[in-house]
Amino acid sequence: MVNTEGKFNLVVKTFKGLEDVLFNELKALGATDIKKGNRMVELKGDKAMMYKANFHLRTALRVLKPIAEFEVANEHELYKSIQTIVWSEYFDLKNTFAVDSVVNSKEFSHSKYVALKVKDAIVDQFRENYEKRPYVDTEDPDVRISVHISNTTCTVSLDSSGESLHKRGYRIKTNKAPLNEVLAAGMILMSGWDKKSTFIDPMCGSGTLLIEAAMIANNIPPGIYRQKFGFESWKDFDNELLEQIYEEENEENDISVKIIGADISEIAIRIAKENISNASLSRKIDLHIKPIENFDPIKTRGGSGILITNPPYGERIKKNELKSFYKVLGDIFKNRFKGFEVWMLSSNFEAIKSIGLKPSNKLVLFNGALECKYLNYSIYEGSKKSKYKDLA
């Protein structure tokens, strides 16, 4: 049966490298029995926690509710096991559904084939019981089912999120190689930004880091822009509970922290403006059309603060120009951003060497399939030696 009372297991998926941030987010939400895994965090929670997780978590991709687990050694056992679940308890003939699968197993080599077998087992059960079958909709299903096979252990879950949670709903357009919203939020939360000092992205593209920073500073939940969540199509959906979370949990701040973005591309700034306007954050973010070489944080009323950026890796700039560009970046950081904490994400490990600055922190993150280094440069006023002398 669908568990509508008490606590149950939940699995929250994220990107590799963001597990600690997600753990802390869940802790702040009041979750219990939290355990970190690879690209996910497990917890126990009730229906309210599941709704809150979808609504509030900035570094979550999906919130899954496991409903069954069994051992399967071949496709026949998989089919039989899937049919032991009474699917009419979870959705009806009038509902559409889709099956997603992740497979890490010698016995099952193709995830799409696993998804197909699971779909067949569900459809056949409905047909046997009702002489009719529900329809599959891979684009926008009412119910999304997640199947995970690790070796011979198969876990079947309901996906309470529906569309991936990185699709906040504020982004109308993007430029090339856009930064994932969940990764952007993770980068900001990992940086330790105090939400009071000036925030700058001088190569802002379509504005994702700026928007996520404004949302974090003003305590705007990422779920506020979403049209719907997957659990809204479930049989036990509690609309009153969701309304309560929307109303009571959304205590927004209205602060005047400076959030400043710039880009060399007029098109990128136009796209960023549209996205920022769609997120109702135009009053909170300043935009400038200018190359980073001409960006002066003092002239843009920035003062000292934090700079977080996702410069070109090679997808948006010619490979042979990258090293010289990164060298220029290093000089700009050193000369223009004294008193700033600079954080930079890049997958071009060779180009990074041309920065000419020693990172005070080095982390590994993934932008889609790209392995990236997330580097922190503390740009001191004067020399490091004089900094410590002043503290003595």
Image (cartoon, rainbow, N blue to C red):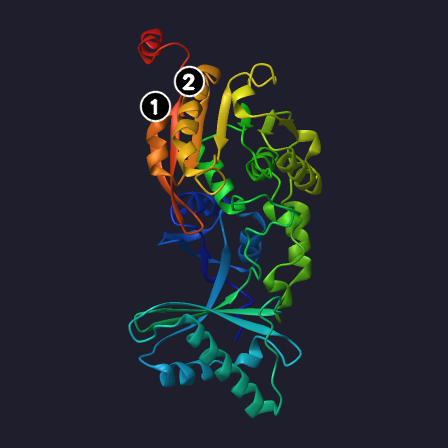
Q: Check contact, mark 2 vs mark 1: CB within 8 A.
A: yes
Question: From what the image shows, is residue 266 above or below residue 196?
Answer: below
| Image spot of residue 153 (x, y percent) | 33, 72
Mark 2 lies on residue: 334
- Secondary structure found at label 1: loop
Q: In this image, 90 relative to 42: left or right? A: right
Q: In this image, 125 relative to 333: left or right? A: right
Corner quadrant of residue 299 = top right
What residue lies at 62% left-to-right and 37% top-to-bottom? 268
Mark 1 lies on residue: 356
- Which is more toward the observer, 314 or 235? 314
Q: In this image, 154 relative to 7: left or right? A: left
Q: Residues within 10 Å of mark 1 (few under 14, many from 20)?
A: some
- Residue 347 — which label? none
| Image spot of residue 265 (x, y percent) | 60, 33
Of the residues shown, which amino acid type is indicated by label 2?
Answer: Lys
Q: In which quarter of the image is the C terminus?
A: top left
Of the residues shown, which amino acid type is indicated by label 1?
Answer: Gly
